[in-house]
Image (tube, rainbow, N blue to C red):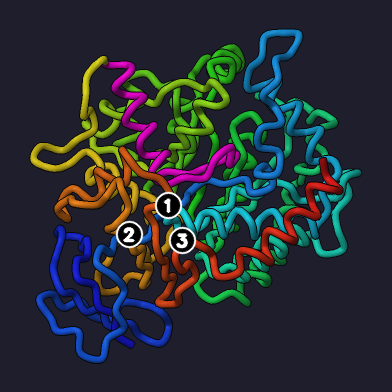
Amino acid sequence: MEFFAENALLAEGWARDVVFKVDGSGMISGVTANARLGAAQRLGTIVVPGMANLHSHTFQRAMAGFAEQCCDSADSFWTWRQTMYGFLDRLTPDDVQAITALVCSEMLEAGFTTLGEFHYLHHDPAGQRYDDPAEMAGRIVAAAASTGIGLTLLPVFYAHGGFGGLPPAPGQRRFINDIDGFARLMESASQHLARYPGARIGVAPHSLRAATVEEIGRILPLAGSGPVHIHVAEQVAEVEDCIAWSGRRPVEYLLDSAPVDACWCAIHATHMTSTETEALARSGAVAGLCPETEANLGDGIFNAPHFLAAGGRFGIGSDSHIHIGLAEELRLLEYGQRLTSRSRNVLCAPGTGTGDTLFGAAVSGGAQALGQPVDGLKTGQRADFVVLDETHPSLAGRSVERMIDGWIFAGDKSCVRDVHVAGRRVVADGRHVARDRIRTDYSKVLGTAH
């Protein structure tokens, strides 16, 4: 199969009249610029790569906006977490499948073509294992497959309620596993994933609060060659607690105690010293940034200029799904730096647009973090095409070199016209092809879980 783009953003930059050859497995087998349309299927005027959403808790989409009322005490991430624990108590496997399908469809409509699901809602409301220990994971796989999004499933190992192996809290009962139980969950989850071509599995020790370094060492082999994701240094209180317990900061402790390398993704990593920032960059790990969720939770602002100057790599995720928007995540990443430094175009590479710099870095970092072949429009990568609407007010009249800047800084998901994953169109004219059914199923969750 062949696809034709009048203008396509390739790894080396914009090219005109591009023909993509796509094999039967949905991979790009050839790219030719300055070509003729011929018998190729026309994609559109402006075509860019799909983006990986590297950090997601899909079930939290259904509670978006629920925690926006002021508490009697000082409101924080920790009070938000209590709201989340109360919400998830009633979610069934059917609910999780419906919510996940909605999230996947909304991601696709925004230009995300791969989901990295940091999955820790494992057990029933009483904290008991389902007959299939990966029942919930299987529902996530089924939902992703129903929408056509690429998937890297990251089952979470969660055993404790604080640093040093403290007992878990009652609200965490649906997350908790021991090593043997987690191994069985991983085995079953792998069987579910085997039925979805191209899906991958990794492993996610939740955090240094929820998993000891000894436990992390024991679960790492379960990932095989897959990625390893971990929350780290998201909150100031987390840093303070880690210092009180170990005498070291979380990123420092992690890098000293675990074999962190390019297979790892450090989620948030918001609160780092200069030494930690440079050490994380040298490790080759990806920083998983979720600017909208980090802003919503009051986490803080990642020191992106220092990290990138040290050679660090990053990708983006929508985490709690308070809002799902590719452009908005990258925009807020840059704007946070502007507010901190009181300057403009902080993360821009010389001679390029800030949007282009952010977009290209996030495409590459997201592909690395999820272990997926989605690192741009080139041979050997999956045929994920995002077609922008060149007539949109935020894009109209711009040269192709200004399209990404227009999308990131003046646009939103309405700039996305069509999306293909592995050569298959899943979004047409801005709508997921199964949007109506997915939203009908999701509306039933609102009546039972809220």
Asked if labels 1 and 2 touch by Cβ distance under 8 angstroms, the answer is: yes
Who comes first in sequence, dot 3 or dot 2?
A: 2
Identify the amino acid type marked 2. Asp
Vertical order, 109 against 385 (above or below): above
Quarter containing the C terminus: top right
Q: Gap in Å between the C-alphas at discs 2 and 1?
A: 8 Å
Q: Gap in Å between the C-alphas at discs 3 and 2?
A: 9 Å
Residue 101 is one of the magenta-drawn residues? no
The residue tagged 2 is 389
The residue tagged 1 is 414
- Residue drawn at point x = 22 percent, y = 38 percent: 354
Q: Is mark 3 on a helix, strand or loop?
A: loop
Identify the amino acid type marked 1. Ser
For the stretch drawn in magenta, the main secondary structure is helix
Q: Nearer the viewer, residue 226 or 391?
A: 391
Residue 250: x %, y % from top left: 50, 25
The residue tagged 3 is 430
- In the image, which residues are magenta? 316-341
Asked if labels 3 and 1 touch by Cβ distance under 8 angstroms, the answer is: yes
Quarter containing the N terminus: bottom left
Identify the amino acid type marked 3. Gly
Name the image quarter holding residue 174: top right
Neighbor class of circle 3 (other Cα within 10 Å; few <14, some 14-19, many 20+) is many
